[in-house]
Amino acid sequence: MPLEVEDITDFELCCFSHKWLLDTDHPRQYAGRIMNADRLEALLALEEEVKAELENRAKAERAQGLHNKWPITDGVVDEPLYLATTPKMLWILKEPWDEGGWSLTKDAIPRMLKEGSIGDKGIFARMAWVTYSVLNGFQTWQQMPWVSNEPKVGESLRRIAYINISKLPGPKVTQMAKLRACYERNKAMLLRQDSATRIGPVESVLS
């Protein structure tokens, strides 16, 4: 759902405007806005850097005949909303599947939200419920509505970061030895993505 002007908070306006600041701000707020604008700029730059790195790697490997896949990129769904959200949530999953050449966070999740096709089963529905609960006072399972009945539950996914250990499409059933190899291969990239979202070390998840 696109943001309307009246729905944008002054913090989000700062994010959209990068370094545009109000002269009337308290000095501490002023400094905070510079930091948040810089964070947005750095986050957007990191996402473009990761995307380019994955595409260049895939091109080289395809040219060598190693595989015929294109990456499925990930990251932050909506950068200004993510930076405006407390607490910030980074979902770390195993690997995507289906054909490559698209983005989970820029294509798949926004499309499903627009179509209302997340449903009440599957990984995205579970992610939506947990995210909505955390961002709304840790509501219990019994308190939360079905995703299909309450758009706000699904819309909570706009406020997350989501990365996969493997960046190439794989089978529906993950082989753990292969996942470990993907982690070792993508470790530096994963840690950069993790650092950009200011969540705890990715390495601890698989150690």
Image (spheres, rainbow, N blue to C red):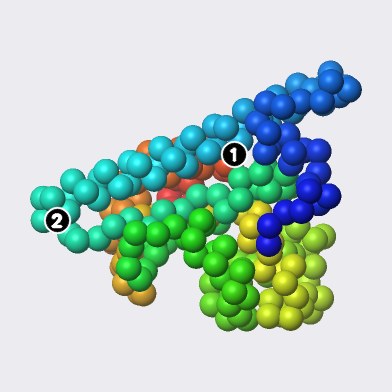
Mark 2 vs mark 1: which is more N-terminal? 2
Vertical position of residue 98 compared to residue 135: above or below: below
Residue 176 percent coordinates (x, y): 33, 64
Number of residues whose C-alpha sits closer than 10 Å to that of mark 2, classed few (under 14), some (14–19) or many (20 or more)? few
Q: For this view, does 90 lie left or right of residue 22?
A: left
- Between residue 70 and residue 192, name the one nearer to us: 70
Q: Secondary structure at mark 1?
A: loop
The answer, for residue 174, to whether it is visible in the render is: no
Which residue is pictured at 39% across the width and 64% down the height?
Answer: 96
In the rendered image, which quarter contains the N terminus? bottom right
Check disc 1 and report the residue beneath it.
198
38 vs 95: above or below: above
Residue lying at the far top in this picture: please name it: 27
Name the disc covering residue 54, or none. Answer: none
Residue 79 lies in what quarter of the image?
A: top right
Which quarter of the picture shows residue 41? top right
Please tell me which residue is depicted at 54% across the width and 77% down the height of the picture. Answer: 122
CA distance for labels 2 and 1: 34 Å
Q: Residue at x 51, y 42 (%)?
A: 194
Q: Is residue 145 visible?
A: yes
Which is more toward the observer, 134 or 17? 17
Q: Which mark is residue 66?
A: 2
Counting from the top left corner in percent of width and height, residue 170 is at 31, 67
Crowd band around label 1 with a 10 angstrom C-alpha radius: few (<14), some (14–19), many (20+):
few
Question: Identity of the amino acid at label 2?
Answer: Leu
Identify which amino acid the numbered label 1 is placed on.
Answer: Arg
| Of residues 19 and 188, the one drawn nearer to the viewer in this rendering | 19
SS for callout 2:
loop
Please report the residue visible at 61 percent of the width from the left and 32 percent of the height from the top: 39
Q: Give the percent coordinates (x, y) of residue 98.
A: 35, 71
Q: Position of residue 164 (x, y in %)?
A: 43, 56
